[in-house]
Image: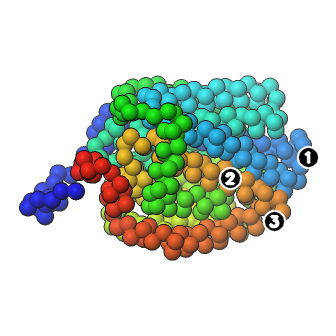
Amino acid sequence: MTSSATDADAPASAPKAPSPLAFVDYRYFWLARFTSVMATIAMVVVIGYQLYDTARSDYGMSIGEASFQLGLLGLFQFVPLALLTPVAGWAADRFERRKVAIFSLCIDFLIALLLAWLTWKNGLTLPILFALGALHGVARVFSGPALSAIAPNIVPAAALPRAIAMSSIAWQSASIVGPAAGGLIFAAHPASVYIFTASLLALAALLLSRVRPVHPPANPARARPLVEMAEGLKFTWRERFLFATITLDLFAVILSGATAMLPVFARDILQTGSEGLGFLRAAPGVGAALVALMLAFRPIENNVGVKMLWAVALFGAATTAFAYSTNVLLSLGLLAFIGAADMFSVFVRGSLIQLNTPDHMRGRVSAVSGLAISASNELGEMRAGSMASVLGPVGAVAIGGVAAIGVTALWAWRFPELRRAKTFAPQPSFTSSLPAEEAHKI
């Protein structure tokens, strides 16, 4: 860090950071993220409904048994994520990042085409759905680190918090439109939803190809691939602040995630069918998009760590309330609140992780963060499905929400650096671990 006589005047005289949308590469990136997320979320929502309906109708399973199948789907998606995350992070730091992301889009494109054909031929079975869910997990593990590592390279550092918020707007608005559109299209003509998603994935790949090449930082002293993969895990483990930020979300969502149970609530509790499932799945996106829009224009600047902890606690409380709701409108409102709290936490966590990670490590650290996010979602689905098979879906979701509040309190006590994070500026543990010439640039 350096200082000068004019530092005190810097905040007043420094020019305002430009909007990320002022950069053409970011505009292409934003549109690619919107279309790809819209496609994949629509596809995942319909797959979950088809799997649950197939288990109930074709295999004659009870609600508890079919709920357990949804949990198994989460496990099948998590296994490739757990196995390939080090490889995906290494690839994002070694190869041209756009090409890695486009590769993952092509995998999902092929999955969508195969699902369209199998749905049209009425050839779907549980083993096929599990296999395609696992293949989708492969696509996700490569897309996350590559896309996360692109944004910091196409906008200046000062614009990065707004870029993250706007990227979240793309994700959340797509998570509103995608499930709703997917549910409605599926109700009208089941196979057509996959033609719709395949078209969006092709468009996303085209848009991403228009972004200028994003090469990883030059590093002439490259180590062996396995060594570089291990470095990302070691760096995250050593940096307590990063470790605490990533694992808070991991355990909170594993314990409180209700997404996997939405097909159960839609079909057998709220009785809204596939159309209602689309709106239930979209409701968190509505709340999240509103918060993301607010943060894009008025980003928070003070006490960011404490606010993140409160957001996670409120996420758990709203999840518990949702479990006991039998009114569709109330359930939609609670899901929107869940999405809003989650978006606030995601924004703070994403900004802190990106700004506390050196560029040459961003792909690998993003892979670790992505694994934690995916583990929380997929293992959370497994946890919910397993508990639902014993306690029922209501009990499984309610207990998870209470547990998330407990995890938040534990992390606030165990990792006081989270409470002490006042701004998004790199934390002392991060800057002290950098070489002097890199710390000087921050």
Q: Label 2: state its secondary structure.
A: helix
Out of 228 and 377, give the one closest to the viewer: 228
Report the residue at 67% width, 34% height from top: 135
Figure check: 140 above or below 272: above
Amino acid tagged 3? Leu
First in residue order: circle 2 vs circle 1 = 1
Residue at the disc numbered 3: 391
Q: Label 3: state its secondary structure.
A: helix
Q: Are marks 1 and 3 in contact (CB under 8 Å)?
A: no
> In the figure, is residue 412 to the left or right of 434?
right
Cα–Cα gap, marks 2 and 1: 25 Å
Residue at the disc numbered 2: 379
Task: Give the numbered dot on residue 318.
Answer: none
Report the residue at 73% width, 53% height from top: 382
Amino acid tagged 1? Gly
Report the residue at 76% width, 27% height from top: 118
Cα–Cα gap, marks 2 and 3: 18 Å
